Image (spheres, grey):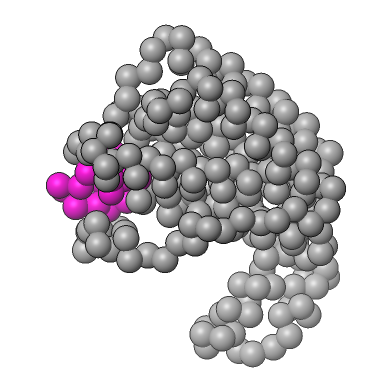
Amino acid sequence: MGKKRLTTKDLEAIPIDLGFHREPANMSDWVAYHVVKSLRIPVDLFFRTKYIHRVVALETVAAVPGMVAGMLRHLRSLRRCSHDGGWISHLLHEAENERMHLLTWMKVSQPTIFERALVTGVQGVFFNVFFALYMISDRTAHRVVGYLEEQAVISYTHMLEEIDTGVLENGPAPKIAIDYWNLEENATIRDVCLAIRLDESVHMHTNHHLSDRIALKQEDLRVDIHKLQEERGMVPKQNAEEVWTKANKY
């Protein structure tokens, strides 16, 4: 954690493409997109303008994909006795980040017993469905997450608009959020929304990228990392593809 705490201006200055949408390019993308769009219908009907409770449900589901994908790739790496290409640590970090989103909003809201039961049921169903989907088509699974994160960015943008217009109260940020995102001590719920929206934007672009990498059969992320290290002069320049050939994997 850095010494300088993030201010509202710092959070607002970080660029984010609010209009981003990955157009479906094939049948797999089309299925993923329309599955996500259909999932939004019951959420809108049930939660309506209860934005805090909506994001609690959203984050309960959002924390599942990274853990499931990381677990399955971990087991695959063990079976093949080979490196995972740099995916597992990222996916688990994504799951942890989404979990912190949930814990933050749980400090803000007080879900009813019925809402807790609904969230638990949705999580149980989604875990098993996503597990099966990842086994069948990991490319489609990551595309689903990419589209889910697009919806998350939209939801947090609407939430920020409601705060700015005075519809939602802009209370103090919970301490768990201040510590996790290194916010100022007087940070507000609006600051938390800005920070989480940035997280969701990163997850959105990352999962669309991972889906593309699977389609291109270029799943070893270490090649890109090596090229970046070369550009920054951290390692001697050489052919990254040759450095991370199958013979050099472990």
Relative side of 246 to 62, left or right: right
The residue at the point 35 percent across, 51 percent down is 194
Residue 87 magenta-drawn? no
Relative to residue 57, is residue 196 depicted above or below?
Answer: below
The residue at the point 82 percent across, 62 percent down is 217
Relative side of 44 to 245, left or right: left
Q: What span is colored magenta in the figure?
A: 173-193
Of the pair 203 and 44, the residue shown nearer to us = 44
Please provide percent x and percent y for residue 227: 63, 80
Q: Residue furthest left?
A: 186
Q: Quadrant of residue 161?
A: top left
Relative side of 12 to 126, left or right: left
Relative to residue 146, is residue 101 depicted above or below?
Answer: above
The residue at the point 70 percent across, 60 percent down is 85
Relative to residue 246, is residue 172 depicted above or below?
Answer: above
Please provide percent x and percent y for residue 142: 69, 47
Please provide percent x and percent y for residue 42: 59, 23
Which quadrant holds the N terminus?
bottom left
Q: Residue furthest top?
A: 113
Of the pair 165 and 54, the residue shown nearer to us = 165
Q: Residue furthest front?
A: 165
Q: Quadrant of residue 211?
A: bottom right
Relative to residue 8, is residue 117 depicted above or below?
Answer: above
